[in-house]
Structures are given as C-alpha cells and as structure tokens.
Image (cartoon, rainbow, N blue to C red):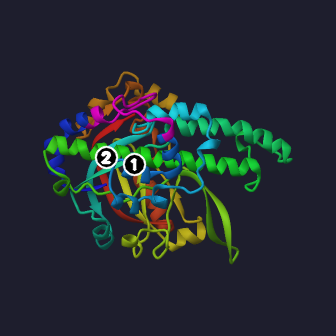
Amino acid sequence: MRSGLSRKDIQKKFHQIVDTLFRNIPSGVGSRRKDFKLSTKELQAVLKDGVKWAVDHGFGSAEDLEHIEEQGCIKGGNPEVVSQRAMERGRPQLGTLGSGNHFVEVGYVDQVYDQQIADTLGLEKDGATVLVHTGSRGLGHQVCDDFIRVMLEASRRYGIELLDKQLCCAPIDSKEGKRYLSAMACAANFAFVNRQMITHWIRESFEQVFQLGPGDLQLDLIYDVCHNIAKIESHEVNGEKKEVCVHRKGATRAFPPGHTDIPLDYREIGQPVFIPGDMGSYSYVLVGTEKAYKETFGSTCHGAGRVMSRHQAKRVAKGRSIEKELEEKGIIVRGASRGTLAEEISEAYKDINNVVEVVHAAGISKKVVRLRPLCVIKG
C-alpha cells in the first residue's frame, strides 16, 4: 500500500503505530480475532467469492478489487471439497497474521530507480508504504495435508513413480487433480480475503493514530499478488501457444507490459512485483517484463530466501535482544513471541540487495523503488 504520509510523519509516531497495529491485527500461531465471528455459510462464501465477499461486508472498496491478482477470486473454488477440519481451522483465523516470515511492515521509499514507473504506482521518495505478507493460515495448511494423502494414493493408482513422497501428484484432468485445484482455489480466496481484512484494519489503525480520514491518509492498495499457487495459464512453449499449469512456489507472477491480466492503470508499465527482504533490511518494488514471460513463464522469486534453518537462527540469536538491535537501526518491531524474532534475524536470509540485482540484471523484473522498514509486526 502507498500513502499520503511521509517518512517523518511515521517517525514521529512509530511506537504508537506499531503498538496499534499489533493490538488490532491478531498475530502468530493459533491467533484469532475475538470480536469477529464467521458462520459456516459465510466461510463458504469467502472460499467461493473471495474479496468480493470482503468488500460487500465493508472491508475495503471496489477500487481494491482492481488491484488484486484475479480481482481477488480464483475461479472454480468449491467449498464442498474442503474438509470439515480445514473449515474449523480457518473460521476463527480470517483477518489474522500468520507466524514465521509473515509480517506487516510500515516503511518508506528509500531509493527510486525508475521515476516514471514510480509515479504511475504512486510511489515517491520518502513516501510512507505498508507491506503485508500472510496467506491462508490453518485452512490452507490443512488443505495441503488432506491432499497429500489423496495424491499419494493417486500416484500409486496412476503408476507415477516418485523419487520423493513430497512430489506426490495426479493428472490435472483426473478426479483427484480437479478436486485439488478446486480446494486450492478456495484456500487462495481465503488468503485474498485474509489480506483484505488486514488491509482494512491497517487503515483503521492509521486513522486512530493520526486522527485523519481516508482522504488525507490515502492508504491505497498498489497490488496484491500470490506467491504459492498453481494456475492454468496460456504460454508459448517451443514457439507454440499452449495452456499449461504453472506452479509458483516461493515465486510471484511477473507479467509484462500489455498483458490483459494486469490492471488498466498499470498495463503500460507491467505488473507490480514485490520482493521483500528481512525485518532489518530492505524490500523492493519491481515490474514484470517480456523476458520473464518468455523465459520463466512470467515469474520472479518472491523473497530473499533463507541461508539458515529456523533452528540454526535461534541458536545464533541466543542471548541477544533482537528488538533492541533493530531499534538501534531505527526499526521498531513487535513479535508474537521472542522465538519468532530469533528465527527471523537478518543473518538467516540472503542479502536482498544481491538477490534483486540478479533478478534485475537477468531481465526478469525491473527495479522501480527500494523500501526501508520503520515498524514491523511479526506473527
């Protein structure tokens, strides 16, 4: 999200901002929002209709829909193929921030690499931004668990030899394949709505802190994009247009200028791409390219990537105050637990600047701006 606020506006109140966000957005393992109840019928509507349900219930506006991948709804979601256990896990977690590397980050534009594209995205030097990373919570996790068992059996039935059980699968057109794509669409729609509700509560939090209305805050959604999904898309393979299933795991869509799946106001520049770093470094906004469409099925990496396991990171962070270290760098952080902050130390990740330079030099996404965090809440 972009805003009408500046870096200085945030720095004047960043303790208040981070505390208000942490209070208003439930965070971490098993978190749930106590003042928001969802019936089974409403949850089924969320899984089927995605962000349209959220907007219809007062969480954001129709303008938000235009700036979400697939307008916030992957078609074909059928709640009947989602298990009761997945529904039970998901119902209380809608509008919550996941654990691990999930976050809400308030920052500012630190560097501008392409002024014209930055202007189109509404991003200016020192302008305040908000970055949200979270997904389908326990519902998506349970859908995955449920279908691993289904796919293991399907692999045997269809005579598919597996080098690793985690590669279990089924033909896309099989009964199992179709059911999984439908369940996955439900999980993706849940994730879209989850982020949309968090977006709404971020706006409310800023209104509380700054005592300003939406017109002054201008907290507008730039884009919302998936990074763990399989989608049926049309791509050129060996010179021939084909319908393919593109799996993006830890990867994000990076469609080029002119592509009809990009919002009209971004169509000339290409799809916005986000590559976040860690809570103590930078994040980047880029745009997709024609080269990505030809060489990587229109895809770019989603983040810096870990160089340490969570267990290793905890060992390295033992005895340190991660909150204090970050505060000395001008970054205020709140975590659902000390363990989460230890797992997410900067040393656990690759250098985001190097990663993005590779992406930019390879031509699969083009750098637009660099963001620096000021306040971060972690799940």
As helix, strand or loop, the secondary structure at mark 1 comes to: helix
Position of 242 with respect to 17 (left or right) is right
Q: Is residue 313 above or below residue 371?
A: above
Q: Is 298 in front, or is 291?
A: 298
Q: Is 42 in front, or is 348?
A: 42
Identify the residue shown where x is 37% and y is 35%.
378
Residue flagged by tag 1: what amino acid is it?
Ala
Q: Which residue is mark 2?
A: 200
Which numbered marker is on residue 54? Answer: 1
Whether the residues at callouts 1 and 2 have beta carbons within 8 Å, the answer is yes
Identify the residue shown where x is 64% and y is 43%.
81
Does the magenta portion include 143?
Answer: no
> Is residue 277 in view from this perspective?
no
- State the CA–CA distance, disc 1 to disc 2: 10 Å
Task: Report which quarter residue 293 is drawn in.
Answer: bottom right
> Is residue 312 in view from this perspective?
yes
Task: Report which quarter residue 64 is drawn in.
Answer: bottom left
Classify the position of the N terminus by image quarter: bottom left
**Residue 245 at x, y = what percent?**
66, 60
- The mark closer to the camera, 1 or 2, is 1
Identify the residue shown where x is 26% and y is 40%.
331
Position of 283 with respect to 149 (left or right) is left
Q: Which region shows up in magenta?
A: 21-41
**Residue 67 at x, y = what percent?**
39, 61
* Residues packed near mark 1 inside 10 Å, few (<14), some (14 to 19) or many (20 plus): many
Earlier in the chain: of badge 1 and badge 2, it is: 1
As helix, strand or loop, the secondary structure at mark 2 comes to: helix
Most distant residue in the top direction = 319
